[in-house]
Each structure stands twice: as structure tokens, then as C-alpha cells.
Image (spheres, grey):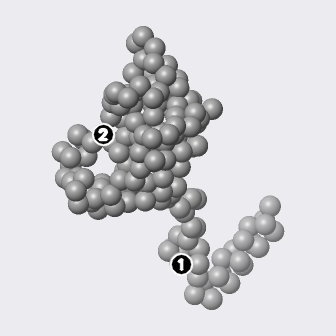
Amino acid sequence: MAILGAVLLLIAAALQLNGCDPARDIGQSPDLERPPLSTPASIEQLTQPKPVAKYLQAHHRLPDFYITKQQAREKGWDPKEGNLCQVLPGRAIGGDRFSNRERQLPQAKGRNWHEADVNYRCGHRGSDRLLYSNDGLIYLTQDHYKHFIRME
């Protein structure tokens, strides 16, 4: 045990002689700093249709980065300016009611539809949306409600 202590003292002394104070330098030297465990995903990555659909299936709600149009407007979003990424970085529009007036999506008593932007690239909103119902149906449109693909 005494030998181990002596070895540790010698190592500490050698480090100090070389200008390294372990008690002071940990985490302060650029080469000792750890990179972040993960780089934050871009809104374009976050709003990919398949991961959003899987999240909806698992949690029965949208991921937390979605915000309704009304909530976004209250925080300064102007759809005409396409300024969502400037006003609310990392957020996308979603959660608003979809009326299904044209009856292109399946109807059932008590079924309500909502929508969420997908494949969002900042700026003005694109034409890609996920439409999801309160009873678990999920559809994708990539041409602003002209055609729908069921997401499984």
C-alpha cells in the first residue's frame, strides 16, 4: 500500500513539473473537454415523417418541439414572413385541427383529425403534412392534401 502511495505521489509531482496541475486542469484544457454526447438535431431531421409517426403511435401526441399556429403567432411568428425558425428556433407547426371537409380521409363517429408539418426546412411552410386521428390513424400528404399515404 505504501508503494502505491509513493508511485501516485511521483506521478503527481512529475505532472506538476511538466506544468500540469491535475486538481486545477481537469475540464479546463481544450484537449480534455468532451464533445457533446449528441449534436442537436436540425428541425429538418426532427420533422421526418417516419420518426414523427412512430412517436405519435407510441405516445399518442406530437413531440414537444411542435407548436400550434396560435401559440406560434402569440410568440411572434408571421406565416407571411416565414420567420418561424428565427422567432422559435427548433420548433415546427403542428397540433391544429384538420377538418377533413373534402372527406378524403376515413371518417368515423367521434374521429377527429389533426395535422403536423413534416419535412420542414425553415422559412415558409411546405406542403408536407402528417394527418393523425384521435383513434390512431396516421396519413402523410406531400402535395398539400391532394393525395394521402397511410403510415403504418
Task: Name the residue located 37 percent from the left edge and 40 percent from the top edge.
Answer: 94
Where is residue 140 shown, x and y percent of the image?
A: 51, 39
Which one is earlier in the sequence, the residue at label 2 or at label 1? 1
Task: Name the residue located 58 percent from the left edge and 59 percent from the top edge.
Answer: 37
Q: 40 and 107: which one is in front?
A: 107
Judge the density around disc 2: few (<14), some (14-19), many (≥20) Cα neighbours within 10 Å.
some
Task: Name the residue located 52 percent from the left edge and 37 percent from the top edge.
Answer: 148
Q: Disc 2 marks which amino acid? A: Thr
Where is residue 76 shown, x and y percent of the image?
A: 19, 52
> Is residue 45 visible to us here?
yes
Q: In which quarter of the image is residue 151?
A: top right
Farthest residue, direction bottom? 18
Q: Disc 1 marks which amino acid? A: Pro
Label disc, if present, on residue 68 of the rendered structure: 2
Where is residue 64 shown, x and y percent of the image?
A: 41, 40
Q: In which quarter of the image is residue 88?
A: bottom left
Label disc, if present, on residue 52 of the rendered structure: none
Judge the density around disc 1: few (<14), some (14-19), many (≥20) Cα neighbours within 10 Å.
few
